[in-house]
Image (spheres, rainbow, N blue to C red):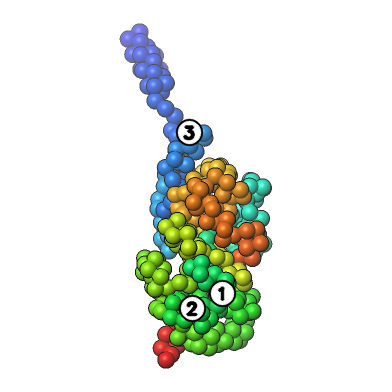
């Protein structure tokens, strides 16, 4: 094509204008799309990550059911990193194929609690590959008034005459699991043996029915239980660690203890959706937030501790001290981590709980 002088001059001006516009506009920012729970990505942590990496973080707050729904609908697209609970991965992956295996060579496991890495790898394993990295964790155990701490050391001690009429727990599966372990049985190992599991549940059912006279009320909400413990209408209960630490900050006479048979533990993980568009950013986020000083900021925001080894050194003092009073290394190693629940078991457990509720 032949261009005259005027056209040549106009083309040159256009090129100059485009180059100037390009120089004055930032390049498209790299982005990490994170779907997570409230408190797991505090503003100050996000800001620090963005500053250090240049990666923008886009957060969607969610829960297990919502994560599953969103990732199922898109075939694992729309997010670069998710944080489902460890017992909500294998079944979902087997049915919907929404996650990709974790490349543990890209994870700085030296800064993670070994027992939690092991538990998460086992709980999220499918066809020889693991699909989760431990992130935030918590437990169910015992909240007790100091006056009965010498008596109530395990779940079945809630049936001791010394605390008659001043006990509370939920009629939910954690209570079934806790009592089973305290009675010397292992319900998790019986998950794939229906007859053995039914036998364990029958023994727990009998124990809970015998224990009914000790129960002030079966609590159904956290606020209800905290109120009962504050007024000392209840002095021994089965409940979450975060609730016990909150009460301990208000009243040092109340404390959360890990039961002798082991606290019951849950772990929320990091999992990478199958159609993640920025896997590199996902691994960068995991390794960044699991640094002890960063992980401590997540604990301060959420009230729950993380799998980061040594992070308790940097947690606010009252929460740190309450945590250390509840969990030494032996108690952490003794945590019974929830495995995935096989289909049908929850129906069996529901029938047991209904009979306990209806018993005189």
Q: Quadrant of the C terminus?
A: bottom left
Indicate left or right for 154 with 26 as reference.
Answer: right
Q: Residue at x 59, y 87 (%)?
A: 199
Q: Is residue 147 above or below residue 184?
A: above
Q: Residue at x 54, y 69 (%)?
A: 149
Image quarter for residue 334?
Answer: bottom right
> N-terminal of the two: label 1 or label 2?
1
Label 3 environment density (alpha carbons within 10 Å; few <14, some 14–19, many ≥20): few
Which residue, as the protein is rendered here, is positioned at the far top? 5
Instruction: Look at the numbered disc 3 and give the secondary structure of its residue.
Output: helix
**Pointer 1 residue:** 151
**Pointer 3 residue:** 51
Instruction: Look at the numbered disc 2 and give the secondary structure of its residue.
Output: helix
Marks 2 & 3, CB-CB < 8 Å contact: no
Q: Viewer-proximal residue, 73 or 238? A: 238
Label 1 environment density (alpha carbons within 10 Å; few <14, some 14–19, many ≥20): some
Q: Viewer-proximal residue, 54 or 249? A: 249
**Pointer 2 residue:** 163
Marks 1 & 2, CB-CB < 8 Å contact: yes
Per the model, the C-alpha gap separating discs 2 and 3 is 54 Å
> N-terminal of the two: label 2 or label 3?
3
Q: Is residue 180 above or below residue 230?
A: below
Residue 100 locus on image (x, y percent): 57, 55
Instruction: Look at the numbered disc 1 and give the secondary structure of its residue.
Output: loop
Which residue, as the protein is rendered here, is positioned at the far bottom? 360
């Amino acid at each position: 094509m032949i261009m005259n002088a005027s056209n040549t001059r106009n083309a040159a001006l256009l090129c100059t204008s485009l180059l100037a516009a390009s120089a004055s506009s930032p390049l498209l920012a790299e982005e990490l799309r994170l779907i997570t729970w409230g408190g797991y990505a505090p503003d100050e942590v996000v800001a620090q990550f963005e500053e250090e990496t240049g990666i923008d973080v886009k957060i969607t707050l969610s829960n297990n059911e919502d994560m599953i729904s969103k990732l199922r609908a898109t075939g694992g697209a729309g997010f670069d990193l998710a944080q489902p609970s460890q017992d909500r991965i294998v079944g979902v992956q087997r049915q919907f194929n929404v996650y990709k295996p974790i490349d543990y060579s890209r994870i700085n496991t030296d800064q993670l609690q070994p027992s939690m890495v092991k538990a998460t790898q086992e709980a999220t394993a499918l066809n020889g590959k693991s699909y989760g990295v431990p992130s935030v964790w918590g437990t169910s155990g015992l909240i007790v008034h100091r006056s009965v701490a010498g008596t109530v050391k395990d779940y079945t001690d809630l049936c001791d005459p010394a605390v008659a009429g001043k006990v509370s727990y939920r009629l939910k599966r954690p209570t079934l699991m806790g009592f089973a372990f305290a009675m010397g049985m292992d319900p998790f190992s019986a998950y794939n043996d229906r007859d053995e599991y039914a036998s364990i549940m029958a023994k727990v059912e009998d124990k809970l029915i015998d224990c009914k006279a000790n129960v002030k009320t079966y609590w159904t909400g956290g606020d209800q239980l905290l109120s009962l413990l504050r007024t000392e209408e209840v002095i021994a209960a089965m409940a979450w660690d975060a609730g016990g630490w909150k009460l301990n900050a208000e009243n040092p006479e109340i404390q959360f203890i890990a039961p002798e048979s082991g606290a019951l533990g849950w772990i929320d993980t990091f999992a990478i959706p199958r159609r993640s568009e920025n896997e590199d950013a996902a691994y960068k986020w995991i390794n960044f937030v699991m640094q002890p000083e960063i992980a401590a900021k997540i604990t301060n925001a959420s009230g729950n501790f993380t799998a980061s080894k040594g992070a308790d050194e940097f947690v606010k003092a009252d929460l740190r001290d309450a945590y250390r009073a509840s969990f030494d290394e032996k108690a952490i190693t003794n945590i019974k981590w929830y495995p995935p629940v096989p289909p049908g078991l929850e129906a069996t457990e529901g029938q047991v709980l209904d009979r306990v509720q209806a018993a005189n």
